[in-house]
Image: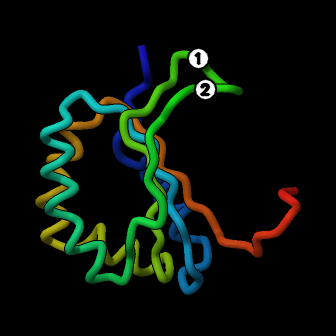
């Protein structure tokens, strides 16, 4: 059985809040669903909030296979959301409209991963 990671723990959110708040961030979202219709409602209701705080979906794709990692993990939704800064992400999740919409996500998600990423210069190397 998959561990149900749906919301951050208090400790995880505290660690996130201690990181720089004024630099651009991207959030890698890996989501396994139990109710796709509820997740679509969450997406529809949160899209305007994401835009209002200056965020957008930077990349979205279809999960195909695990090459390195647990074979049992698969994802129904994979995307990277970009925010002008971490404060904008926090503003979004504290928004009253988001707080109402997130109940759809909590109902829809079986498990997920939400990973904060800091941008760096792209080039030929990756190390």
**Residue at x-position 61% and y-position 21%:** 70
The Cα atoms of the two marked residues, 1 and 2, are separated by 6 Å
Quarter of the image where the N terminus is located: top left
On screen, residue 59 versus residue 70, left or right, reads left
Q: Where residue 35 sits: x, y (%)?
A: 18, 32
* Circles 1 and 2 in contact, beta carbons < 8 Å: yes
Q: Secondary structure at mark 1?
A: loop
Q: Mark 1 — residue?
A: 71
Q: How is the image coloured?
A: rainbow
11 lies above or below 88: above
Tell me: residue 4, above or below residue 50. Answer: above
For the residue labelled by badge 2, is the local secondary structure a helix, a strand or a loop?
loop
Total numbered circles? 2
Which disc, if any, is residue 45?
none
Looking at the image, residue 20 sits to the left or right of residue 36; the answer is right
Q: Residue 47: horizontal and vertical position, in percent?
A: 23, 67
- Look at 55% across and 72% down and name the residue there: 25
Q: Nearer the viewer, residue 54 or 104?
A: 54
- Counting from the top left corner in percent of width and height, residue 53 is at 32, 82
Q: Residue furthest top?
A: 1
Mark 1, other Cα within 10 Å: few <14 / some 14–19 / many ≥20: few
- Mark 2 neighbour class, 10 Å CA radius: few under 14, some 14 to 19, many 20 or more: few
Task: State the residue at coordinates (30%, 67%).
Answer: 93
* Mark found first going from the N terminus, 1 or 2: 2
Q: Position of residue 87 (x, y in %)?
A: 44, 80
Q: Which residue is mark 2?
A: 66
Observer-nearest of 58 and 103: 58
């Amino acid at each position: 059985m998959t561990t149900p990671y749906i919301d951050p723990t208090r400790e995880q959110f505290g660690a996130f809040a201690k990181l720089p708040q004024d630099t651009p961030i991207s959030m890698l979202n890996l989501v396994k669903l139990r109710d796709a219709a509820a997740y679509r409602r969450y997406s529809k209701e949160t899209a305007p909030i994401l835009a209002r705080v200056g965020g957008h979906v930077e990349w979205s794709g279809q999960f195909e296979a695990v090459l390195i990692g647990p074979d049992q993990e698969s994802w129904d939704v994979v995307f990277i959301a970009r925010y002008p800064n971490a404060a904008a992400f926090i503003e979004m999740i504290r928004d009253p409209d988001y707080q109402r919409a997130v109940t759809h996500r909590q109902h829809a998600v079986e498990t997920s991963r939400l990973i904060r990423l800091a941008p760096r210069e792209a080039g030929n190397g990756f190390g």
